[in-house]
Image (tube, rainbow, N blue to C red):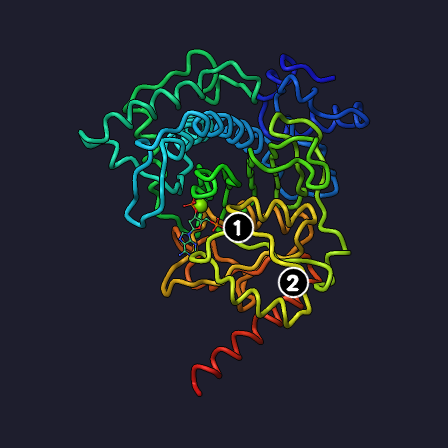
């Protein structure tokens, strides 16, 4: 069994050395799980990857991202249990945002800043309201929550080089600056991270699904995605296994689900049984304002789907799809001119693609992550296993055509 001490030493090696060493360990211990039991959370170790697959492994990035998301998930769970009404304010777009959103972004951005100081970040939140005198009370709460999460002695991928663990306490200004590192405008060249500290804030406030989401995009391609879902059952068919899932995908190296404590890694593959639309139901947003429920109904009836849709907040939908639940995730705009945000889809896209699925917009175009903070001209989202995707997309286009003809008549 690998120990935290031995892992700590090879985290300091460069990426090639890390890969070779992990390969050696993997060959020696392939029958062992890479984590200790869920009772004692352990350092996350990227899984064995085949030498024949020469795409970049992003091993260090994966470890840092997992550590950051797990700490942020601990924080958001704690916030939910202690949340009071006056800690919620209303953003310009009227969506609720809590101290949890800001504090989780502060934690993730602080860790990324330590590990990869040159990498820009596209984050959902910014700290401008917190810098105002009337934001002081909220800022104080956020600083305290973020420092608690950064310094607590959880074995959640602790590595002082990433600015976590005892002694990692930050000043107010450092944490506000970390949040504001998320102001990057995005673009098509070079590396950048996306953070959605609490995706599905409405679900979070209802005590339902939400997700802490992080991705690394390099030259417009999502290379790494990590999605933490504290309220999602580990196994939908076995609720007794509890809740708390972590989805991790690295392009070219597969997708997996673990428990939030890093136990029971399982590779994800969308099953072929999900190729036939009659057998599945749609995954869709709870919010009819985010995604047209009536459009999905019409696509369902065209495909002969009889089961009702599964409504769920956040990118937990991509996680469920990747592990074979649902069958397709369909999101058609309801608000004219709304542009989907890259942080709402980047981790989910790489996860589903690495699980063998396809993610496009409603025209069948690939999602564009290099056009700034939004998906640019993409219109709607269609995600499904390969064969199902073609069928769903055809039905989506048929309904769009029908709508256009009705509008002309
Ligand atoms: N009019 C709209 N159309 C589509 N998505 C919207 C929207 N308004 C907000 N959203 C996005 O929908 C996300 C939630 O996704 P879902 O509907 O699948 O639960 C929100 O994330 P946040 O909760 O992080 O703000 C927000 O970014
Ligand atoms: Mg979001």
Q: Quadrant of ligand 2?
A: top left
Q: 96 or 68: nearer the eye?
A: 96
Percent x, y of residue 187: 40, 51
What residue do we see at 29% from left, 22% from top? 140
Percent x, y of residue 371: 41, 56
Distance from label 1 to label 2 (Cα)? 20 Å
Q: Nearer the viewer, mark 1 or mark 2?
A: 2
Percent x, y of residue 275: 73, 60
- The residue positioned farthest toward the bottom in the image shown: 409
- The residue positioned farthest toward the left in the image shown: 133
For residue 402, above or below residue 381? below
Label 2 Cα neighbours within 10 Å, binned few <14 / some 14-19 / many ≥20: many
For residue 389, above or below residue 314? below
Q: Quadrant of residue 365?
A: bottom right
Percent x, y of residue 406: 47, 82
Ranked by sequence position, the earlier of labels 1 and 2 is: 1
For residue 132, above or below residue 386? above
Residue labelled with disc 1: 221
Residue labelled with disc 2: 389
Q: Quadrant of residue 114?
A: top left
State the quadrant of the N terminus.
top right
Q: Is residue 147 left or right of residue 317?
A: left
SS category of the residue bearing label 1: strand
Q: How many marks?
A: 2
What residue do we see at 70% from left, 49% from top? 324
Q: 128 or 395: nearer the eye?
A: 395
What residue do we see at 49% from left, 77% from top? 403
Q: Are marks 1 and 2 in contact (CB under 8 Å)?
A: no
Residue 398 circle label: none
């Amino acid at each position: 069994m690998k120990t935290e001490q031995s892992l700590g030493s090879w985290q300091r090696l460069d990426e090639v050395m890390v890969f070779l060493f992990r390969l050696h360990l993997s060959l020696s211990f392939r029958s062992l799980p890479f984590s200790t039991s869920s009772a004692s959370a352990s350092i996350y170790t990227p899984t064995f990857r085949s030498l024949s697959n020469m795409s970049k492994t992003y091993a260090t990035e994966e470890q840092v991202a997992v550590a950051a998301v797990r700490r942020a998930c601990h924080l958001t769970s704690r916030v939910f249990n202690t949340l009071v009404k006056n800690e919620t304010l209303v953003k310009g777009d009227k969506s609720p945002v809590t101290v949890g959103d800001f504090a989780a972004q502060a934690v993730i951005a602080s860790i990324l800043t330590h590990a990869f100081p040159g990498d820009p970040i596209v984050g959902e939140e910014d700290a401008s309201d917190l810098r105002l005198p009337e934001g002081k009370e909220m800022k104080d709460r956020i600083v305290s929550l973020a420092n608690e999460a950064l310094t607590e002695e959880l074995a959640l991928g602790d590595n002082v080089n990433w600015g976590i663990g005892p002694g990692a306490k930050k000043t107010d200004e450092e944490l506000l600056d970390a949040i504001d590192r998320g102001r990057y405008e995005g673009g098509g060249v070079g590396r950048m991270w996306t953070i959605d500290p609490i995706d599905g804030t409405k679900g979070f406030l209802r005590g339902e699904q939400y997700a802490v989401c992080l991705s690394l995009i390099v030259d417009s391609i999502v290379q790494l995605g990590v999605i933490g879902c504290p309220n999602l059952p580990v196994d939908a068919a076995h609720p007794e296994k509890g809740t708390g899932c972590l989805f991790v995908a690295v392009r070219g190296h597969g997708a997996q689900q673990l428990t939030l404590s890093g136990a029971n890694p399982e590779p994800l593959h969308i099953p072929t049984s999900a190729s036939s639309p009659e057998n599945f139901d749609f995954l869709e947003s709870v919010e009819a304002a985010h995604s047209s429920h009536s459009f999905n109904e019409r696509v369902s009836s065209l495909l002969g789907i009889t089961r009702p849709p599964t409504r769920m907040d956040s990118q937990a939908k991509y996680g469920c799809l990747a592990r074979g639940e649902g069958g397709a995730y369909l999101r058609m705009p309801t608000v004219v001119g709304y542009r989907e945000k890259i942080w709402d889809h980047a981790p989910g896209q790489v996860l589903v693609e690495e699980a063998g699925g396809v993610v496009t917009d409603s025209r069948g175009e690939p999602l564009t992550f290099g056009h700034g903070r939004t998906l640019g001209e993409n219109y709607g989202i269609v995600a499904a296993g390969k064969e199902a995707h073609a069928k769903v997309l055809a039905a989506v286009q048929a309904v769009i055509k029908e709508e256009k003809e009705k509008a002309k008549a």
